[in-house]
Image (cartoon, rainbow, N blue to C red):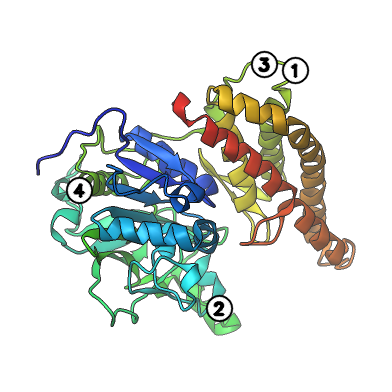
Amino acid sequence: MPTAKIPEQCPALYILWDSSSIWGLMAWRAMLSLGMPCRLIKAKEIAEGGRLGKSDPVPLLLAPGGNARHKALALGVRGRDAVRAFVDRGGNYLGFCGGAGLALSHKQQEQGLHLCPLRRASYPERLHHLISGHVLARTQSDGELSPPDFLWLPQEGGGKRRQGILSLPVWWPGRFDAKSTENGDVAVLAACDAPDRDFCIADMPFRLVPRHIFALWQDLYGVNLSADFLAGQLLAVSGRYGLGRYVLSYSHLETPRSPDANAWLATLLRVLTRAEPSGIIVGQWDLHRIRAVWPDTRENAPLISALRRSRALLRMAVRQRLFFVRSPWLAGWRAGLPGANLNSLHTALCSAASLTPGEAALEYWHMVRPRFTRAADLFFPGAEGWLLAFRLGQTLSPILPKAVDKRGLDKQQTALFGQPMQGGGLLEELLAMTEELIYLSQDAV
């Protein structure tokens, strides 16, 4: 397929920045790793007509993971209309996880883009949402959107992979409602088959539990952790909307060092942008090796200090067996802990401190530095105390179940970390300021 050369001043795609947190950073980094010229854009820019206009040459809008409802609210009526108009005129939409959910049809109009007639499925059991890691997925041919053929060539050391089976990463995904396809044609690109090597349910590694134990648990406690619910679940779909098309994936194809996913992502980018990626593997993302480039001055000290405190907080949580090292870019956590929030803050601080700030970023930092400093000085000692109190409560619960007041713990958790899936608290205040610094510093990349 011939590819059109995109002028250097024009990005091959836009990345929707709102309500994406760690997933937005991962998507941005993946595009840069694959050599795709891109820009972060805000929902406000789209709503005000500054992006995705009729004269805008960008062929693709990428919506990363994150909270789909918050993304829809950030876009507002005008922003959602602008995205639909963009795709209707021939633009393309690629959504991962929360970005996929954003494109679905919803009972309430304001909660989605309604590009795809599928709806989001509910969870019969909440545990079904607490899955992460890689799954084996059956892929189906859909012409140019199919995974590249070389993925099924003989591997080093002999042996051949099963045709059409890929190892694809999922990180606490939503689900497509497969029964909601009556209103339009939707092509299934991939469906789950079975867990793969690093699959977890909550904080429990699936491969470390003997198969017969799952049946025993179900008989004794009525809890199904066998992951048999995965089989046949839709993982990636595509379809047409007007002159354009959408590709929606609950697999994070942009996950670092996930070869099958990355190679398929490169193919999708080639098709959806008509630009040629410079590679097919997203490089490793080791957050602990990232070095700050901000000048080490008194004025910049609060940002560098926050990064160091964030790393220290995660190390303490690992030592206390509340968190564990999942990958170089992600810390795992025990159920009930605000692990997603802390990962997002740590990732944002690493990213912001590693970008050379321009004039706009420095001006913004000068304005928010006092507020950032106050919030950080409250948050980090508070978070450390809360995590240790949580650990104490878990330790003493068999003999002194009321030793740590649960209501007090919950109240402090809300003040520090906000509500699950809703955000808020001191952490969100710090995260919002850090993400704005990243957005204003993107030209430094």
Which element type, helix, strand or loop, lies under badge 4? Answer: helix
State the residue position of label 2.
223
First of labels 3, 2 by sequence position: 2
Give the class, few, some or many, for how many residues have Cα within 10 Å of label 2's Cα (few <14, many ≥20).
Answer: some
State the residue position of label 1.
298
The reply to whether callout 3 and callout 4 are in contact (CB within 8 Å) is no
Q: Is residue 375 above or below residue 340?
A: above
First of labels 4, 2 by sequence position: 2
Front position among marks 2 and 1: 1
Front position among marks 4 and 2: 4
Name the image quarter holding the C terminus: top left
Q: Would you say residue 318 is visible in this rendering?
A: yes
* Real-space Cα separation, disc 4 to disc 1, in angstroms: 48 Å
The reply to whether callout 3 and callout 2 are in contact (CB within 8 Å) is no
Q: Which amino acid is tagged 4? A: Val
Name the image quarter holding the N terminus: top left
Q: Would you say residue 97 is visible in this rendering?
A: no
Which element type, helix, strand or loop, lies under badge 2? Answer: loop
Q: Which amino acid is tagged 1? A: Arg
Q: Which amino acid is tagged 2? A: Val
